[in-house]
Amino acid sequence: MTGEGPLMLDRILGQAAEAPWAETLHALEHLGGLETVAIPEAEAARKRIRLTTDRGRDCAIALPRAQKLTDGAVLYCRDGMAIVARIDGGARLRLVPQSLGDALRLGHWCGNLHWKVVFGEGWMEVILDGPEAGYRDRLRDLAPLARFDIG
């Protein structure tokens, strides 16, 4: 928007859904002062990202190692304007191991392939960064070592 360079976002201030942020952001949204940055989930682990808000504002995120980008992270709030991160879910492949041992082997396998994953109760989802067929092909190689369903 301006020729001054990007707005530096160097820390996470809080979460949009938590008090007092929820009230503050709701009020700013009504005043037209709420902007968001869309971040693909596969990129959310990065500490440094250059991007543009939904209103065209040039931003550079440079977070400390201890902080992690999550959906709803409040990155800026000053002078009647706030910026909130929105993590884009993207395509996923859900894997459901049949036992604890299968889960360990499956997790180890995915880690060795450097796949980005999200864990849930009894399942894990691989965040697809390419065609699903390539992931399924690699998982076929694991079938003799771990029992799991693809759902």
Image (tube, rainbow, N blue to C red):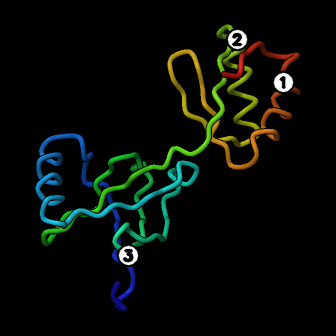
> Residue 101, which numbered label?
2
For the point 39% across and 50% down, which residue is it?
67
How far apart are the alpha carbons under marks 3 and 2?
A: 48 Å
Q: Nearer the viewer, mark 2 or mark 1?
A: 1
The front one of 63 and 70 is 70
Q: Quadrant of the C terminus?
A: top right
Q: Within the image, what quadrant is residue 33 found in?
A: bottom left
Q: What is the C-alpha distance between the residues marked 3 and 1?
A: 45 Å
What's the residue type where badge 1 is placed?
Leu
Asked if marks 3 and 2 touch (Cβ < 8 Å), the reply is: no
The N terminus: image quadrant: bottom left
80 relative position to 38: left or right: left
Q: What is the number of the mark on residue 114?
A: none
Residue on which the image places disc 1: 142
| Disc number lying in front (3 or 1) | 3
Please give the name of the residue rendered at 61% of the width and 42% of the height, measured from the top-left corner.
91
The residue beneath circle 3 is 56
Q: Nearer the viewer, mark 3 or mark 2?
A: 3
Circle 1 packing at 10 Å, graded few (<14), some (14-19), many (20+), is some
Q: Secondary structure at mark 3?
A: loop
Q: Amino acid at mark 2?
A: Gly
> x, y percentage for residue 143?
84, 19
Amino acid under disc 3: Gly
Residue lying furthest bottom: 3
What is the x, y in percent for residue 35?
29, 64
Question: SS of the residue at dot 2?
Answer: helix
Q: Relative to residue 49, is residue 96 drawn left or right?
A: right
Q: Judge the density around disc 2: few (<14), some (14-19), many (≥20) Cα neighbours within 10 Å.
A: few
